[in-house]
Amino acid sequence: MPNHRQRCAQALPETLSLLKQLATIESPSPDKAAVDACAAFVSEQLSALGADVTIVPQTTAGNQIQATWPGVDQSTQFLTLCHLDTVWPVGTLAGMPLHEENGKLFGPGVYDMKAGTAILLTALQVLREAGLPPKHPVRMLFTGDEEVGSLTSRNLIEAEARHSLLTIVLEPALAGGQIKTFRKGVGEFTVVAHGRAAHAGGDHQKGINAIEELAYHIPALQKLTDYTTGTTINVGLIKGGSASNVVPERAEMEVDFRISQMAEIDRVVTAVQGLRPVLNEARLEISGGLNRPPMEHNATMVKTFEQARQLAASIGLTLEEGSTGGGSDGNFTAGLGIPTLDGMGAVGDGAHAAHEHVILASLAERAALLATILTQWEA
């Protein structure tokens, strides 16, 4: 069995150059034109490698890319998932420029998760140069709305996953290099209170304060948190009112919730949907629900990780596992029962933070591991 580490290490300068180009194309989720520009660049790179590439146009989010790399056995496929959108607005690079320091590359989006795209393209390049096709075709999806819930890409992800023996999510690894074998499910509710506006001095008694109405429900929502089951509720954003001398007629709050097990979703949904107005004549409007199911650490996950660990060991790498409260598109595929390896991207730290960075050596190591999985995985 070939050890791809040397080839990927030799390709590291090209991998780093590609990552810098990707990071230079700033692509925040809400900016469709910016995400589309990044998708166009990635499409060019895929086509140059010889992949079969299709752009899936979107109207409300960045365009998606479907690409296929040929494999030996056509009876099934590998699925790889990358997202091209980031949380960083266009212009961030001006004050947070890319720079290398102590074997690390710092900059917005490099860790979460443009390094994952660079790793995937490097692995394919190395396999092509070695004349080694994957055991099965590689179906690649590059999406543009993961950071905002994957609302336009979920159906495509789940459809492709159902035809796949393994999904490889090139999200960044945990800070210690572990891949992610457990993720919490993620959801959000919006609770809107409707009251009645009135002059805060002359007609105070005629008003119904929507902010006051919301205030009654915040403690009840926060108390839904249950650390023993891994469920957390966070009232994270409140908006309401127009001026201090006006009784507010409308107020809303956004409520983030995370669950470790699907059994908790009924309790949370029932409690939130069961909220009733406290103030006379006030009205509540509640929307939202679960966006991503939990990635549970079940028997399928244990078996999938063990094979990945063994393949990593076969090329001299130590692969460990860990958990996170954050969600990814891997939640969707694991929720369908599809074997999923998540956090297969770069090692680093600082996702969504000013110190975001990747460890350069990990780019070559993860590309080598990916190439090994694509050529050696046993169903």
Image (cartoon, grey):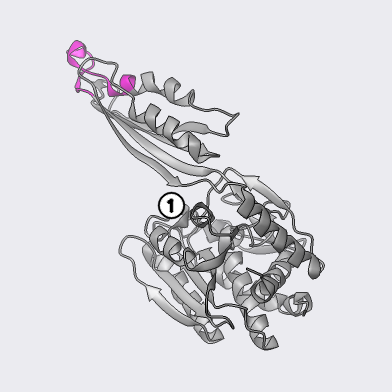
Which image quadrant: the C terminus?
bottom right
**Quadrant of res 276:** top left
**What amino acid is at disc 1?**
Val
Q: Position of residue 314 (x, y in %)?
A: 80, 69
Q: Is residue 14 shown above or below 227?
A: below
Q: Is residue 315 left or right of residue 256?
A: right
Q: Is residue 334 left or right of residue 101?
A: left
**Occupied quadrant, residue 120:** bottom right
Boundaries of the magenta span: 195-213
Front residue of this view, candidates 177 and 297: 297
**Residue at left 74%, top 67%?**
311
The residue that disc 1 covers is 148
**Does 36 sit above or below residue 154?**
below
The residue at 70%/52% (across/down) is 321
Residue 134 image point, x, y percent: 62, 79
Q: Nearer the viewer, residue 372 or 113?
A: 372
Q: Is residue 256 left or right of residue 275?
A: right
Question: Residue 376 magenta-drawn?
Answer: no
The answer to whether any part of residue 237 appears in the image is no
Q: Position of residue 116 (x, y in %)?
A: 60, 65
Q: Within the image, what quadrant is residue 229 found in?
A: top right
Drawn side of residue 296 relative to residue 61, left or right: right
The kind of secondary structure element at disc 1 is helix
Q: Position of residue 211 (x, y in %)?
A: 32, 23
* Total number of numbered discs in the rendering: 1
* Residue closest to the far right: 316
Q: Which residue lies at the image location 64% right of the left edge and 76% below the top edge?
A: 122
Q: Does 118 sit above or below residue 242? A: below
* Residue 322 is at least partly visible in this image: yes
Position of the N terminus, as image quadrant, is bottom right
Q: Residues within 10 Å of mark 1 (few under 14, many from 20)?
A: some
